[in-house]
Image (cartoon, helix red, strand yellow):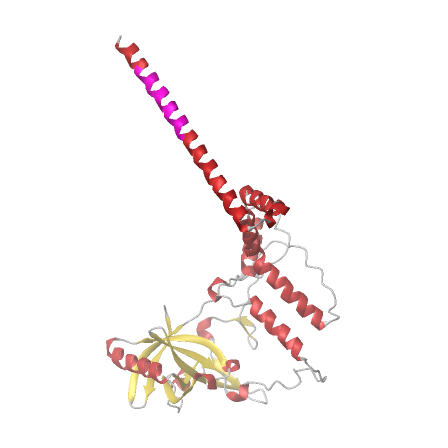
């Protein structure tokens, strides 16, 4: 990654040479301004107002406009000699718990790369100290013509820095919350909690920019001369008249969408688990309700003995039948072998 700033981290009397690189990148699709009649590019030209002519980049400098419109030139050399220690240094001023930082203050993110072999040990020392303390470092640095506030934290094996807004740059949320007095019942909170639990969590790695993908499809269709895809019809919305009903419907819809597939699988298992044999057994058991069931115990024993005798006879018959069948098969085989031998 290409560095955008070179300097050092000032950690007490320890100086760590580092390079500042961007930690994020944009995948947004950019457009060019064109003349609608012939698709000619529209370009901006830098023109001097006094001479009414276009000037090159080498002729352009910086100046501060005073209240009366006077221009005060400021050169790069003037900026390089600013009387502050953060001109080329990220100066750590404090270590605080991470929850002390308001997310509203956080801005651009950078990686701090070690600047050479001599920076390896102090860089690692600062990284391990941040890990063990479970704190973040608050630092001041100068970038793009102004002093800024930053927060240093550990990301993997690297040190990252988040640009922070100064506290007086964050607006207070005055006039944002509704002025009307509203009473929230416990049942409404319970339904809101149930909806949150039903929706569950999400893996941020699974989220992607669907708008960019749709825009790429439109560009591809236009480039190939095809009609761009049509957007789906928006869902018909209605006025929310009852908050409780809306919450209940939301919880019900979320549960149905999450449990529809699992419920279908369970039903299939239940259908497959029943067999015709089980059904027949249930029917036979239910139909045997006769007065004979009220007989005394000796009668049951005699019945069971008779059943045992009948079972023995049946087994003997089946054994004899099997023997006779086996004998016939053996005789048939011998006859066939004799014929083949002859």
In reply to whether residue 296 is colored magenta, the answer given is no
Question: What is the total number of numbered labels drawn onto the structure image?
Answer: 0
Outermost residue on the bottom side: it is: 83
Q: In this view, does 57 lie to the left or right of 114?
A: right
Picture coordinates of residue 51 (x, y %)? 55, 75
Q: In this view, does 325 lie above or below 69?
A: above
Q: Is residue 320 above or below residue 234?
A: above
- The residue shown at (39%, 81%) is 152
The answer to whether residue 289 shows anywhere in this view is no
Q: Is residue 54 left or right of residue 150?
A: right
Relative to the observer, which residue lies in front, 314 or 172?
314
Relative to the observer, which residue lies in front, 143 or 170?
170
Q: Is residue 59 left or right of residue 229?
A: left
Which stretch appears magenta?
319-334
Picture coordinates of residue 288 (x, y %)? 61, 45
Q: In which quarter of the image is the C terminus?
A: top left
Picture coordinates of residue 104 (x, y %)? 53, 81
In reply to whether residue 321 is colored magenta, the answer given is yes
- The residue shown at (71%, 60%) is 236
- Residue 196, located in which quarter of the rendered image? bottom right
Outermost residue on the front side: it is: 298
- Residue 280, located in which quarter of the rendered image? top right
Q: In this view, does 181 lie to the left or right of 142?
A: right
């Amino acid at each position: 990654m290409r560095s955008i700033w070179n300097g050092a981290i000032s950690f007490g009397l320890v100086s760590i040479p580092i390079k500042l690189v961007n930690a994020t990148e944009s995948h947004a699709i950019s457009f060019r301004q064109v003349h609608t009649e012939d698709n000619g590019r529209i370009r901006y030209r830098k023109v001097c107002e006094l001479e009414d002519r276009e000037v090159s980049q080498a002729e352009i400098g910086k100046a501060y406009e005073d209240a009366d419109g006077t221009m005060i030139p400021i050169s790069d050399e003037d900026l390089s000699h600013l009387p502050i220690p953060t001109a080329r240094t990220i100066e750590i001023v404090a270590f605080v718990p991470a929850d002390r930082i308001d997310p509203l203050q956080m801005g651009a993110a950078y990686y701090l790369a070690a600047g050479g072999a001599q920076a390896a040990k102090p860089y690692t020392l600062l990284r391990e100290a941040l890990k063990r303390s479970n704190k973040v470092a608050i630092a001041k640095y100068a970038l793009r013509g102004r002093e800024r506030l930053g927060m240093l934290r550990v990301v993997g094996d690297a040190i990252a820095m988040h640009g922070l807004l100064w506290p007086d740059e964050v607006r207070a949320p005055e006039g944002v919350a509704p002025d009307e007095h509203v009473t929230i019942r416990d049942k409404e909170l319970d339904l809101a909690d149930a909806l949150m639990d039903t929706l569950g969590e999400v893996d941020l790695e699974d989220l992607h920019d669907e708008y960019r993908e749709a825009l790429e499809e439109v560009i591809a269709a236009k480039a190939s001369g095809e009609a761009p895809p049509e957007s789906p019809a928006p869902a018909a919305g209605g006025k929310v008249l009852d908050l409780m009903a809306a919450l209940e419907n939301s919880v019900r819809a979320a549960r149905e969408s999450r449990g529809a597939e699992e419920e279908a699988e369970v039903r299939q298992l239940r259908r497959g688990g029943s067999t015709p044999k089980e059904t027949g057994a249930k029917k036979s058991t239910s139909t045997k309700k006769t007065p004979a069931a009220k007989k005394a115990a000796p009668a049951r024993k005699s019945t069971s003995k008779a059943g045992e005798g009948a079972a023995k006879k049946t087994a003997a018959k089946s054994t004899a039948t099997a023997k006779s069948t086996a004998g016939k098969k053996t005789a048939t085989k011998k006859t066939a072998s004799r014929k083949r031998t002859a």
